[in-house]
Image (cartoon, grey):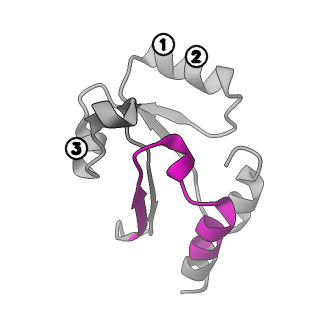
Amino acid sequence: MSDQYQEFRSAGAEVLAVVHASKRYAERFGKALNLPFPCLVDTEHAVFDLYQIESRLISLGQRPGLYVIDRQGVVRFAQIGWQQWEIPRNAEVLKVCGSLARD
């Protein structure tokens, strides 16, 4: 998503990363990956619990989740994977974001 961040912005979307870690870790994570979007801290696991993102041994850590949430707070697209490579392709997510912009 980093490489196509401006395309997401042009589609009327904002991209956020959420980590269940300290602020210092989130800053290092964002810097190490050169993220152009915010990396939010969820030390209380509130966002992870709300969207059912769980740590599982089989996924070797945190299960990846990707959500498209409209301006009214309605989840319009959701995919939770077992591994990082199971996140949908940007083109698929951009298509969803573009359809919301037309609504």
Q: Amino acid at mark 1?
A: Arg
Classify 92 as above or below 8. Answer: below
Q: Position of residue 16 (x, y in %)?
A: 52, 45
Image height of 52 relative to 93, above or below? above
Q: Please, what secondary structure does the residue beneath circle 1 have?
A: helix
The disc at residue 24 is 1
Q: Does the magenta segment cover residue 31?
A: no
Viewer-side label of 3, 1: 3
Q: Nearer the viewer, residue 42 or 53?
A: 53
Above or below, 98 relative to 53: below
The secondary element bearing badge 2 is classed as helix
User: In the image as oriented, which residue stretches furthest toward the bottom?
Assistant: 103
Name which quarter of the figure residue 30 lies in: top right
Q: Measuring 75% from the left and 61% from the top, which residue is drawn there? A: 7
- Bounds of the magenta segment: 76-97
Q: Which residue is mark 3?
A: 49
The amino acid beneath tag 2 is Arg
**Residue 12 in sight from this viewpoint:** no
CB of mark 1 within 8 Å of CB of mark 2? yes
Q: Which amino acid lies under the numbered mark 3 shown in the image of this protein?
A: Asp
Residue at 62%, 69% (x, y): give it: 92
* Depth check, front residue: 37 or 65: 65
